[in-house]
Amino acid sequence: FARDPRFNILLLPQNVGKRKAQIAAIRRSAGDMVLNVDSDTILASDVIRKLVPKMQDPAVGAAMGQLTARNRNDSWLTRLIDMEYWLACNEERAAQARFGAVMCCCGPCAIYRRSALASLLDQYESQYFRGKPSDFGEDRHLTILMLKAGFRTEYVPSAIAATVVPNKLGPYLRQQLRWARSTYRDTLLGLRLLPNLHRFLTLDVVGQNLGPLLLALSVLTGLAQLALTGTVPWLASLMIVAMTMIHCSVVALRARQRRFLGFSLHAFIN
């Protein structure tokens, strides 16, 4: 690509992290749109054609495509993650997009309006967490800044991007912990936006933050009951199993793919 005159390759003197690399590229760019692609991602050939029409509306600041696991067939875990991505895109993001506010435009495939980015770069660059410059959660924070500035964010299911996902449990759990930290940290910023957005988004944000905590509390309470009384919390266990199976069955019907019944195994990881 360096030999292609249409490309301008920027090599920074050292590894300064994704955020500063993004900012350096955006400040050197001149096009109306900026497409962000992670280094482990391959885009379908028509992704830009699918994303750009969404950006013709000047009220839209960013749009993301649908993510799939590029290495889906590597292991049982990568198959689960591929299903998890389908759910995150076609349930969560699709529902949020109905109300004009996708809460996180994911890094593997997201397009931004450059004029909107230019006005937010200083805020984006100067984010601190616990007294140090933030080095995680770039995608979510940039999306929240877009929404805070009054722009809409959209989801385009036909713009497909295939990204490499962890094929072992340890790296996957570390990735999920990093993403969870980002979600909880930026929720405080997101809460200030919610009064100006549709009420569904309030329910969605509250559910995303309280759901995992309540599930963890249920499991811990069940283990405590088992340890202290020697009795199994059958009612709570059956409720979790029932909710999981109903969810997976509905998704299997929507996607018309029986493999989503196997997504119930993800409840243990969750």
Image (cartoon, grey):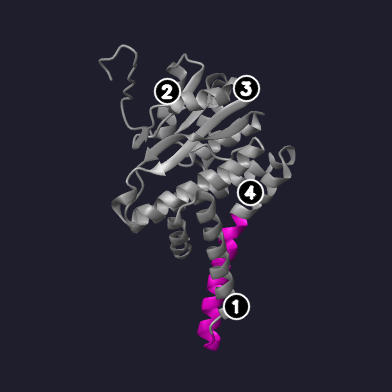
Q: Could you tell which of marks 2 and 4 lies nearer the N-terminus?
A: 2
Residue 9 is situated, as x and y percent measured from the top left of the image, at 32, 20
Which residue occupies the foreground of this view, 113 or 130?
113
Residue 116 is situated, as x and y percent measured from the top left of the image, at 58, 22
Which residue occupies the foreground of this view, 112 or 131?
112
Q: Is residue 224 magenta?
A: yes
Mark 1, residue position: 235
Secondary structure under tag 1 reads: helix
Q: Residue at x 63, y 20 (%)?
A: 58
Separation of disc 4 and disc 3 at Cα?
Answer: 26 Å
Task: Report the disc number at residue 156.
Answer: none
From the viewer's perspective, is 231 left or right of 163? right
Q: Could you tell which of marks 1 and 3 lies nearer the N-terminus?
A: 3
Residue 140 is situated, as x and y percent measured from the top left of the image, at 53, 39
Mark 2, residue position: 24
In this rendering, the label closer to the viewer, 4 or 3 = 3
Q: Could you tell which of marks 1 and 4 lies nearer the N-terminus?
A: 4
From the viewer's perspective, is 236 left or right of 202? left
Secondary structure under tag 3 reads: loop
From the viewer's perspective, is 71 left or right of 113? left
Separation of disc 2 and disc 1 at Cα?
Answer: 55 Å
Q: Could you tell which of marks 2 and 3 lies nearer the N-terminus?
A: 2
The N terminus appears in which quarter of the rendering?
Answer: top left
Specify the amino acid type for callout 2: Ala
Farthest left residue in view = 3
Mark 4, residue position: 205
Q: Is residue 261 visible?
A: yes
In this rendering, the label closer to the viewer, 2 or 1 = 1
Would you call the spot at circle 4 few (<14 residues within 10 Å), some (14-19), or many (20 or more)? some
From the viewer's perspective, is 119 left or right of 165? right
Q: Which residues are magenta?
A: 209-231
